Amino acid sequence: MFDNLSDKLQRVFKNLRGEGKLSAENMEAALREISVALLEADVHFRVAKQFIEAVREKAMGSEVLTALSPTQQVVKIVRDEMVKMLGQHQAKLRTANEPPSVMMIVGLQGSGKTTSTAKLARWLSKNGHSPEMVSVDVYRPAARKQLSVLAKDLKLSIYEGAPEETKPVDLARSARKDAVQSGRDVLLVDTAGRLHIDEELMTELTELKELLNPTEILFVADAMTGQDAVKSADEFNKRLGITGTILTKMDGDARGGAALSIRAVTGQPLKFVGVGEKPDALEPFHPDRVAQRILGMGDVLSLIEKVEESIDQKSAEEMQRKLLDDDFTLADFRDQMKQIRKLGPLESLLGMMPQIGPIKDLKNMKVDEGEITRLVAIIDSMTARERANHMIINGARHRRIAKGSGTSVQDVNNLLKQYAQARKMMKSFTGGGGFLGKRLGKLKLPMGFGPQ
């Protein structure tokens, strides 16, 4: 996400650094380029204009133009204004004084309301809550069935309703009663949608709002629709009074215009973003982290959180010991690859790394996810002795391993080369002198991104 905008902004800053000294003229030229980059990223024209004016006001002062590092000052100003545009601070979910806290999930048909409801329920359950879900979409039985299937897959509570409950308000009323009786502290209400906003839909949602008195009305929008998503969010906010937005399909939106515009246009925060199809592919929205990613500074905090959630800490500490003792075997290499796979798409992880220094081009690396499966299969075809000591793998063993894993001798050779390179790279990172080691402090990361 934000790849195109990020590349263009970094080019602008590189050109500014090449000027040596900033002037009003080259600063204006840079602002024009930033404006074009924002508009090409599908940022709302009014939001882009306000952003440029705010940056201009702060960047054209004499204290910036005459500073020792003027370009760094400009980058900081752009970052600060971008954080402000995105919402300044992470907007957390509101909860009621007396449970259950009711959260209505609203939006147009096809925006991803039902899957977002299930993802949000999973996120809540992982963060100390006991959510219950209900679908009040009485017009599309498939929508209610979909939520039921997702609830069963995720082992989450759902109120499915009685046969006589054919009205949204009846379902919602009974679901809240059931949530109270079963001790649930959050009730997520997946509402019906339409292909476009109409009076019937808004009347129904208003009735549900009056009945439930929700702590949150979360508008779900498809990021791929760009400014249409922003326009719909604005309309829902004017008619219903939303409290925040969930943007889906952010992983497929290279421009990011909706994410950059939605808070400024609606006045309501972006609370979560969907970054994939898996149940855990829903992330809280952090304005400061997103601004840093756009400007090529990386999102190390989110990377740390993802690793800490997915990676077993004891295993990571044991792996660190083996690296320092030069006892890192092929079996360990296989286990590390399996742990990395738990973190999600590798390209997404690489995009979180700072785009500077020796790893500045990592985000452009194309990762073959199937390669990990092949490498694991090759190592699994080895004997325990071979995994413990790769030096004994001769020509005959190469052929046997290749045949057993359904690969070629060349594939086995490539694996052993990658293993040797990984050992060398990981040793340098975990030794404390490497770039990643300094950036990530004491965090235990897989594949050599380890503690210092």
Image: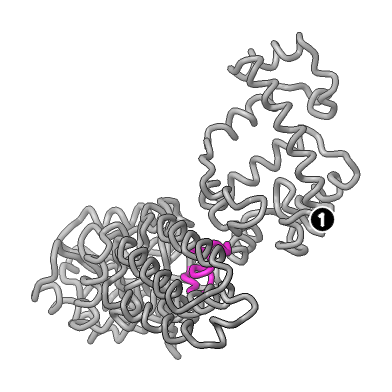
Quick one: 375 or 368, which is closer to the camera? 368
The quarter of the displayed image where residue 96 is located: bottom left
- Is 293 in the magenta? yes
Residue that lies at the very extreme toward the top in this rendered image: 396
* 183 lies left or right of 263: right
Q: Reply above or below: 446 against 118.
A: above
Q: How is the image coloured?
A: one colour
Q: Give x and y (percent) for residue 400.
A: 70, 12
Give the residue displayed 77% in from the left and 22% down from the top. 383
Q: Name the secondary structure under disc 1.
A: loop
* Quarter assignment of residue 208: bottom left
Looking at the picture, how far across and down is residue 90, in whole percent?
Answer: 49, 78
- Spot occupied by residue 137 in the image (x, y as percentages of width and height): 21, 64
Can residue 45 be seen here? The reply is yes
Quadrant location, the C terminus: bottom right
The residue carrying mark 1 is: 433
298 shown above or below 180 = above
**Residue density around tag 1, few if under 14, some if 14–19, many if 20 or more, within 10 Å:** few
Name the residue located 40 percent from the left edge and 81 percent from the top edge.
101
Q: Residue 122: horizontal and vertical position, in percent?
A: 47, 63
Give the magenta-colored segment's residue range.
Answer: 284-298
